[in-house]
Image (spheres, rainbow, N blue to C red):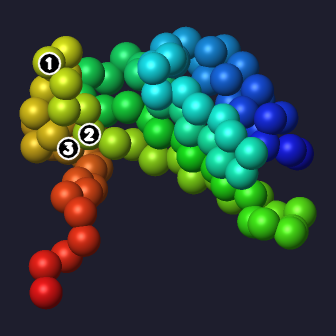
Amino acid sequence: MSLRELFNYYKTAMAKRGLKSVALLERIEARDLNLVYRGPWGDREISISGSEVMNSNTRYVNLQFIARRDDDAELSPAAGEKLAGIIIRHSHGPPRQ
């Protein structure tokens, strides 16, 4: 599948599952794509990113939950982790040396 086909596939698949797209964060370019969706949980979103290796027919897609940090988030990340029984990783930049 091309990046455009992957982009369209995930947009359709996530909408069919009742997830709401965060349109401001949608992006597709020549070699990468980004989509973000919100669902029934109030403390996290689904982030979908994809990339294409230059001069190759290889594409990578990554789906992950990310903690919401906006004013509409219903739970703190810690409360969401406890409720869902999962650990949400927080990225704060590169490790200190």
Tell me the residue that label 3 is attached to.
Answer: 81
Q: Amino acid at mark 3?
A: Glu
Tell me the residue that label 1 is attached to.
Answer: 71
Q: Quadrant of the C terminus?
A: bottom left
Look at the numbered discs 3 and 2 and tell me whether their residues touch, using CB distance below 8 Å: no
Q: Residue at position x 19%, y 25% from top?
A: 70
Residue 42 point in image, percent of width and height:
26, 21
**Left or right of 3: which side holds 1?**
right
Q: Quadrant of the N terminus?
A: top right
Examine the rendered structure and indicate whether residue 94 appears above or below residue 39.
Answer: below
Examine the rendered structure and indicate whether residue 44 appears above or below residue 19.
Answer: below
Q: Residue at position x 86%, y 69% from top?
A: 55
Residue 32 point in image, percent of width and height:
66, 48
What separation in Å lies between label 1 and label 3 (alpha carbons)?
18 Å
Look at the numbered discs 1 and 2 and tell me whether their residues touch, using CB distance below 8 Å: no
Tell me the residue that label 2 is attached to.
Answer: 67
User: Nearest the camera: 27 or 73?
Assistant: 27
Residue 3: name its quadrant.
top right
**Left or right of 15: which side holds 37?**
left
What separation in Å lies between label 3 and label 2 (alpha carbons)?
10 Å
What separation in Å lies between label 1 and label 2 (alpha carbons)?
12 Å
Which type of secondary structure does the marked residue at label 2 adopt?
Answer: strand
Q: Residues within 10 Å of mark 3 (few under 14, many from 20)?
A: some
Residue 87 is at least partly visible in this image: no
Which type of secondary structure does the marked residue at label 1 adopt?
Answer: loop
